[in-house]
Amino acid sequence: MNILKDLTLITASFNTPIITKNMLLSFQDLHFGTDILVCENSNDNETKNILKEANINFIISDDKRHSPSINVLLKAIKTRYALLVDTDIIFLRSISDLFDTFKRENFITMGEVSVDSMRMYEPRIHPCFQLIDTHFLKQYNIKHFDEKRCQDRDPLPGIKNYDCGSSFLEDLRSKKAKIGNINGHGYYFYHYGDMSWSHQMFDPNILNRNDFNKGSHGFTHIYTNGLKKLEQYMIENKHFSDRKLMKKI
């Protein structure tokens, strides 16, 4: 295991105790002792009880949306560096070499710089896996999510539309920040997608219904996961099912 000093793993969750626990277990297996901070926004206590038992820090955001919760997390951590991840990733190997490169090259952030296929949104740094130098953000008062630009509305052609990570990338580029572009999916981690912000807690009865939740952009997101994806996730991560998070001392 490699303890990543001066770094905090941060993640925002909503009613996803199974995948939040599994993600943290996969991280702990490789980096036990590294700081962790979770923003759990739901009223359900299962995730909070799992974290309490392991003595892992968590906070609650007054704003129940995913993107503003990232601002809360970045403001709350004490370390210089943050590793922002979605809860629906599983770590495949240690990121110690990547973190060393990040610091040595003086990157301000490192992650996958991407453009959506429909080109409705501005380019963004994908928030599913992203290293961040928080000192730079504080120096220039940069937020990961800017409410003024990322308004709750349907994306409209011909105007600037912002997804989570879009305004962040725009602000960093305006400050000439050094940005590392890396897609670690399949190497450092596996990202399942569309499972990190949910109401259903993997209840098959709910999964068979059309449950909708208002997304942070203002248009309707479908947060129910197809049974095929759920089955894949549960089979591939069965080895985590009976385990508990390691207790931080």
Image (cartoon, rainbow, N blue to C red):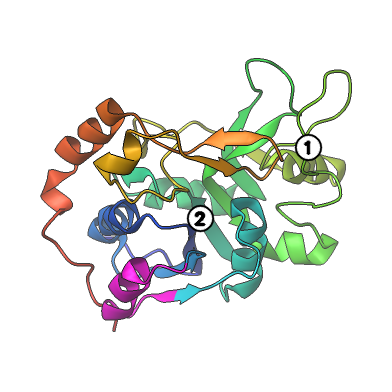
- Find residue 35 and report its horizontal and vertical position in percent: 42, 71
SS for dot 1: loop
Q: Which mark is residue 153?
A: 1
Q: Mark 2 packing: few (<14 Cα in 10 Å), some, or many (20+)?
A: many
Mark 2 or mark 1: which is in front? Answer: 1
Q: Is residue 144 above or below residue 50?
A: above
- Find residue 205 and report its horizontal and vertical position in percent: 27, 41
- Find residue 3 and report its horizontal and vertical position in percent: 34, 66
Q: Is residue 124 left or right of residue 48?
A: right
Q: Quadrant of residue 92?
A: top left
Q: Amino acid at mark 1?
A: Arg
Q: Is residue 75 above or below residue 159?
A: below
Q: Residue furthest bottom?
A: 249
Cα distance in 3D space between marks 2 and 1: 29 Å
Q: Point out the stretch of residues depicted in magenta.
A: 43-57
Q: Quadrant of residue 213?
A: top right
**Residue displayed at 45% across by 45% down:** 98
Q: Quadrant of residue 65?
A: bottom right
Labels 2 & 1 near each other (Cβ < 8 A):
no
Query: Which one is nearer the viewer's eye here, 145 or 152?
Result: 152
Q: Is residue 130 left or right of residue 178?
A: left
Query: Which one is nearer the viewer's eye here, 119 or 198?
Result: 198
Q: Which mark is residue 74?
A: none
Quadrant of the frame with the N terminus: bottom left
SS for dot 2: strand
Q: Which mark is residue 83?
A: 2
From this viewpoint, is residue 211 visible? Answer: yes
